Image (spheres, helix red, strand yellow):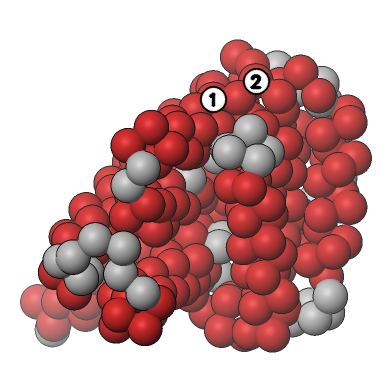
Amino acid sequence: MAETHVESNNVKSKNIKNREFSRIIDSNIVSTFSPFHWLSLAVKDFINAPMIAMVYGIVFSIIPISICFLVISTQNHLFILPSIVAFALVGPAFATGLYDVAWELEKGHKPTFKHSLKSMFRNPVGEWGFALLLVIIMIAWMRIAALIHVLYPSYADPTLEQLINFLAMGIAAGAIISSVVFTLSAFTPQIMVERRVDIMTAVITSIKAVNKNAFTMFVWALIIVAMVALSVLTLGFGFIITMPLLAFASWHAYIAVIKTKRHRDYE
């Protein structure tokens, strides 16, 4: 009987541990047009912490500006699609510092660079593990882009009709991979900034929350695409403003969608 009792306790203990790992945090259903409210809150955050936001924006903009000048200098437009998608893949993982700024502002604190930099090590296993996951996806995307490049016409000045297969495959592959990454990263970095949870819990929660608010997140994705496109049209300099705004808005999206058992005094 004693052995049976011990075995029963061990099973219960294992079940508890299993429930703690890769569990799902519940989420709210929000209005379809909530992303515009998130963006308005992001503008307020930018105004309240302009210096930090601009510094992060400049750091973020270095990559896209380099991509634009590389394309212009080499006149090789084939760099554009894979490079922009690659940038979009790794961007969410490195917006952690800006999430911390938005969090500090919501709590009524004055954000600082030191505090925002420390946030990158608040949940190091989860945060850097997720960054590594995005890098792996980015590498996979670059390999796919290289394979798609085989479809590019081998002669000079191809017509649009001759480019159609190449463009169709590139756009389809980029859209699919970007959609997957958006679903994975919509709330994952923010969850790991505020809560010390494992990466699987954060990722699965993000996937479920996006699916639960499909139309809302589609509107949010369109806003992100529009702001990224606008920034690209400014040769990457627009990212100095748009990246902090998107990061701040993403934090407010997290606050609105992902539930918490403890009441947030700053809501």
Can residue 159 be seen?
A: yes
What is the x, y in percent for residue 121?
Answer: 44, 29
**Crowd around label 2: few <14 · some 14–19 · many ≥20 (10 Å):** some
* Of the pair 161 and 218, the residue shown nearer to us: 161
Tell me where residue 160 sits by quadrant. bottom left
Instruction: Answer with left or right where residue 219 lies relative to residue 92.
Output: right
Do labels 2 and 1 touch, CB within 8 Å?
A: yes
Q: Check residue 171 in the rendering and tell me which mark sits there, or answer none.
A: none
Tell me where residue 23 sits by quadrant. bottom left
**Crowd around label 1: few <14 · some 14–19 · many ≥20 (10 Å):** few
What is the x, y in percent for residue 207?
Answer: 48, 75
Residue at 63 percent of width and 69 percent of height? 221
What is the x, y in percent for residue 168?
Answer: 36, 81
Q: In which quarter of the image is the N terminus?
A: bottom left
Q: Is mark 1 on a helix, strand or loop?
A: helix
What is the x, y in percent for residue 21?
Answer: 35, 65
Check disc 1 and give the amino acid type.
Val
**Number of numbered markers:** 2
Check disc 2 and give the amino acid type.
Val
Residue at 52 percent of width and 79 percent of height? 208
* Of the pair 200 and 132, the residue shown nearer to us: 132
Residue 50 against residue 243 in the figure, above or below: above
Residue at 18 percent of width and 65 percent of height? 155
Q: Check residue 59 in the rendering and tell me which mark sits there, or answer none.
A: 1
Can residue 124 be seen?
A: no
Instruction: Answer with left or right where residue 34 lies relative to residue 11.
Output: right
Q: How far apart are marks 2 and 1 (CA)?
A: 6 Å
Residue at 76 percent of width and 18 percent of height? 51
Name the residue beneath numbered marker 2. 55
